[in-house]
Image (cartoon, grey):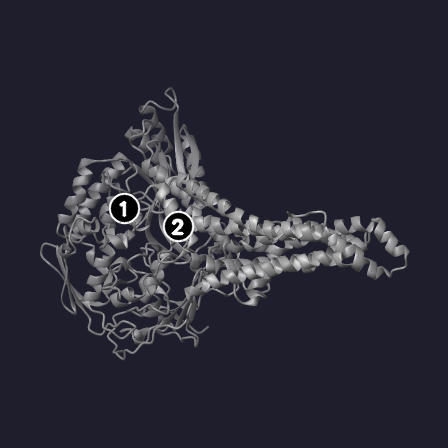
Amino acid sequence: MEKWLKPWMGAILVLVLIAAFGLFAVGCGSDDGDTTDTTGTEATDTEDTTETSEGEAGAGDLAEDQTITVQIASEPPSLDPNLATDTTSALVINNIFEGLVRLDANGDPVPGVAESWEESEDGLTYTFMLRDDATWTNGDPVTSQDFVDSWLRILNPETAADYAYQLFFIQGAEEYNAGEGAVEDVAIVAPDETTLEVTLKAPAPWFVPLMSHQSYFPIPMATVEEFGDQWTEPANIVTNGAFTLEEWNHEQDISLAKNPDWHGAADVSLETVEMPMIQEATTGVAAFENGEVDVQRDIPVADVDRLKDLPEYETFPLLGIYYYGFNVENEALSDVNVRKALSLAIDRTTIVENVSKQGQTPATSFTPEGMPGFETFSGIETDVQTTADVEMAQQLLTDAGFGEGGEPLDVTIYYNTDEGHQAIATAIQSMWQQVGVNAELQNMEWKQYLDFVQNNPEVQAYRMGWVADFNDAYNFLDVLRGGGGNNYTRWSNDQYNELLSSALEAGDDQARYDAYREMEQLIADEVPVAPIYWYTDPDLVKPNVQGWHPNALGSTTNFEEISISAE
Amino acid sequence: MAKYIIRRILWTIPVLLTVVLFSFLLMKAIPGGPFTREVSLPQQIVDNLNEKYGLDAPWYTQYARYVYHAVQGDLGVSMTQRGRTVTSIVGNAFPVSMQLGLGSFALAMFIGVPLGVIAALRHNSWADYVAIFVASIGWAIPVIIIAPLLIYFFSVRWNWFPAFGWGDTERMVLPIIALGTGFTAYFARLTRSAMLETLQQDYVRTAKAKGLPWGKVVWRHVLRNSLIPVVTQAGPLLGFLVTGSFLTEYIFSIPGMGRYFVDSVTNRDYSIVLGLAVILSAVIVFANLVVDILYGFLDPRIRYD
C-alpha cells in the first residue's frame, strides 16, 4: 500500500521546496525598505506670497475629496533631479521639487524659488534673488548654496549624469565635466544665502526658462550624502516643492501629498495625487472608463477614433516635431532636387488625419508652431505644403534624371519597430510610389536603430522625433548643426552653422528670430529633413478635474493648479 | 541519493557560469548600448557613464568582475534605474510573479484535475462533452485574447474587479484566471486521458471483481495511478510559471519579472539581463532536479547511484 502514497509525497515536496525558494526571494527583497512614512516637517512658515494663477478653478464648488489618480506609464528611472532624463521622472520631480523659476501654461517663466532675476548687458551674467520663505521639508531654508551644490554635483564626472550637458552653457562647466577643468573654474557663485550668480560662456537667451528644467533644481546635499543612492526613497527624501513624496512602491505606484509648508500652499487645493504605473495603454483606458483613473496620459492609436469625440478627450500642444531625415551623403539622396521631390510627395494632411490620428498639425517647417517667434520664421518661402504636390515632385525627379525615361530611384525608409511608425512609413512608401520612387521599408529594434542611424553610412531616409527641452527655436535648429551629435543627415552648411552662433549674439529677440528665419529658409531650400507633423499631447481627463494643463515641453503638469470640482 | 543530489547541485556551477558567459557575449554582440540615447550624448558624458559602470574595461575583465561579485551575492546595479540594485529589483518582482504563478498553478490543480476526473468517470456522457469542450476552448484561446476580454467584461462593463495592478486579493482575480485558464484546460485533458487509460487496466478490473466499492477503486487505484503523469508535468510548469509571464503581467500592469525579460534587453541594461539569466537558470536547474528526484519516488525502477 505504501507505494501509492509516494506521488502525493512528491507533490507536497515540490510545493514545500518552491515555498522555501519563495521565502528566500522575499528575504532578498526586504532590504529595500518600502517604508511609507515621510520625514516629519517642522517648518511653520506658511505666509502666503504666491504668484500662481488659479485659473479656471476659482468659482466652482470643490469636492470634499481632493484626490486625483494620474496614470504614468512606468517606474520613474530616477527621482534624483540631477539624474532623471525621462518625462515620467520629470512629472514627479517637477511636483515635489521647485526650481528657480516655473513655467506657466504658456511656457513663460514665473518666479519659483527665485523672486526676481537680472541679466547683464552682455547677456552673459545672470543674478537670481531667492525668496526667503522657501524651505525644505526638513525645515531648513532653501539657499543659493543648495543650487551651487546641485549644479556642481551634476557636472561632477563621477556623478556620470546624462543631463550634465544641459549646464554646458555655464562657463567652465563642460571642461570640469570632461575632467579637464577645475571645479573652482565653474562660474557659479553664491555671494550670500539668497543670491546666486551665474556666468555663461556665450549668451543663451533661454537661460531663465531653462531654470525650470529638473537638472537645474536644488538638492539637499546633506541628505544626498547621508543616504547615497537611497536618498530618493520616501523615508529619506527631503524636497522643496508643492507636494511631498509619500509612497513609492517600485514598479507599482507613487503617491504624493500636499506640502502644507510650501510657500504657496494656501492656494493649493489638491490633497493627494495617486500615480499608478500602467504600461499597457489599452488597460489604462479601461481603468479610466471604469473610474479607477482620473487622467489617462497614454492613448493607443486604435482607440482614438472611438474616444476623440468624448468631452474627456483633450488635446494639448506639445513643442515637438516628427520628421524624416535624409542622409545627404548617400548617392541617391545627394541631389537636393531628389530630397525636395520626396518631401513634396508627402501628403502630411492625410498622414495626420488618417494615419497618426491624434490631432497633430501637419508641419511645413522644422521648428513647431507655438515656439516664441514662430510668426517670424513660419514666413519662409517653401514649396512644401500640408498636402502633396505630385506634379512638381515628378518634375523635380525627372530633372534629376530619375523616373520616366531616367533611372529608377530606390530609397529605403528606416524606422524603429513600432506600430505607429510602421503605419506612417507605409503611407509614405505609397506616396513616394505615386511619384515613381521605389521605397522599401526596413525596421529595427530601438537601440539597434539608433546605433544604425547614428553611425552607419548606408542609412537613407529615417524617421526621428524631437521634443523641446526649452522653449526656444535654437533647441530645434541646433539639431541640424553641421557635425552635431544629433544631426544624422550628415548635412553641413557653413552659412547655417554661422547663423547658429551669431543668432545668440543678436541682442534682442526679434533679431534672433530673424536669424532663425534665415536658417529655416536654408532647411527649406536644402531639404536635409522633411518635416511631417508637430506633436500634440492627448489625454483622457475626467470632467471634474479642473486645471489639468501639461506644459508644451511635455515635461510636467503643475499639480498645484489642479482641483477636483464637486459634480 | 544524497551523493546524486550533491553531484547535481555541483553541476549547476559550470552551468550558471556558462549561461552568464553566453548572455554576456550575446548582450555585447547586439548593436547599441545602455547609453545609446535618442538625444545623442556628448562623448565625454558617455565616457563618464562607462567608467561609472565599469564598461570601459575589456570584456573578460568585466566578466571576471561580474562573477567575482556575483558569488558574493552582489548582482550589481541597474544601468537604467539609477541607484537600484539588481537584487532589490528582482527581490520586488520575483515574489509577485511567484504569487501569480502559484495562483494559476492552484487553479490548474484544483479545477483542472477534478474536471478531468469527472470527465473520465462520466466518459461519453454530457458531463464529459461539456468538460472537454470547455477545456478545448480554454486551451485554444491565448492569454492575449482572454486578458482583454476579462478586463472588458469584469472591469469596464460590470465593474466587479479592478483593471490593473497587484496586491489586494481583488486585483489578483482576473490575472490569475487569465494565466490559469490555459493550464487548467491542459491539466483537465491530461488527467482525463490518463484516467481513461488507467480505467482499462487489469488491476482495476481485479479490484472491481473482488468486490471493492467503486468509490474506493477510483480513489485508491485509478486516481493515484493516473496522477503520475500530472505530477511529472507539474514540476517544470511550476518552474516556468513562477519566473514570470510577460503577457499577463504586461496587460494587467503587474510588477513582476515578466516585463524585465523584454525591457532589460530593450534598454541594454546588462546587469538586469545577467541577473535574470542567473535566476532563471537557477530556477530551471532546480526544477529539473526536483523532477528527477520525483521520478525516483514515482517509479521504483529508477535508481540514483
Residue A35 in the image: x percent, y percent? 41, 70
Numbered disc in front, either 2 or 1: 2
Residue A540 visible, this orientation: no
Task: Give the residue type that dot 1 points to.
Answer: Asp
Frontmost residue, B112 versus A163:
B112
How much space separates mark 2 and mark 1, taking CA atoms? Answer: 24 Å
Left or right of A153 on screen, residue B272: right
Task: Give the residue type that dot 2 points to.
Answer: Tyr
Tell me the tag on residue B302. none
Residue A423 in the image: x percent, y percent? 45, 41
Instruction: Determine the image quadrant of residue A492.
Output: top left
Residue A34 drawn above or below residue B189: below
Residue B27 visible, this orientation: yes
Looking at the image, which residue is at 88% across and 56% down?
A: B208
Identify the element where label 1 is drawn: helix
Label 2 lies in what chain?
B
Residue A554 in the image: x percent, y percent? 34, 56
Label 1 lies in what chain?
B
First along the sequence among labels 2 and 1: 1
Dot 2, how many residues are within 10 Å of its Cα: few (below 14), some (14-19), or many (20+)?
few
Identify the element where label 2 is drawn: helix
Given the current orientation, which residue lies at the most extreme bottom position?
A44
Looking at the image, which residue is at 27% across and 38% down?
A: A382
Left or right of A551 on screen, residue A148: left
Left or right of A311 on screen, residue B157: right
User: According to the image, label 2 marks what residue?
Assistant: B68
Dot 1, how many residues are within 10 Å of its Cα: few (below 14), some (14-19), or many (20+)?
some
Looking at the image, which residue is at 82% across and 61% down?
A: B216
Frontmost residue, B15 versus A387:
B15
User: According to the image, label 1 marks what residue?
Assistant: B47
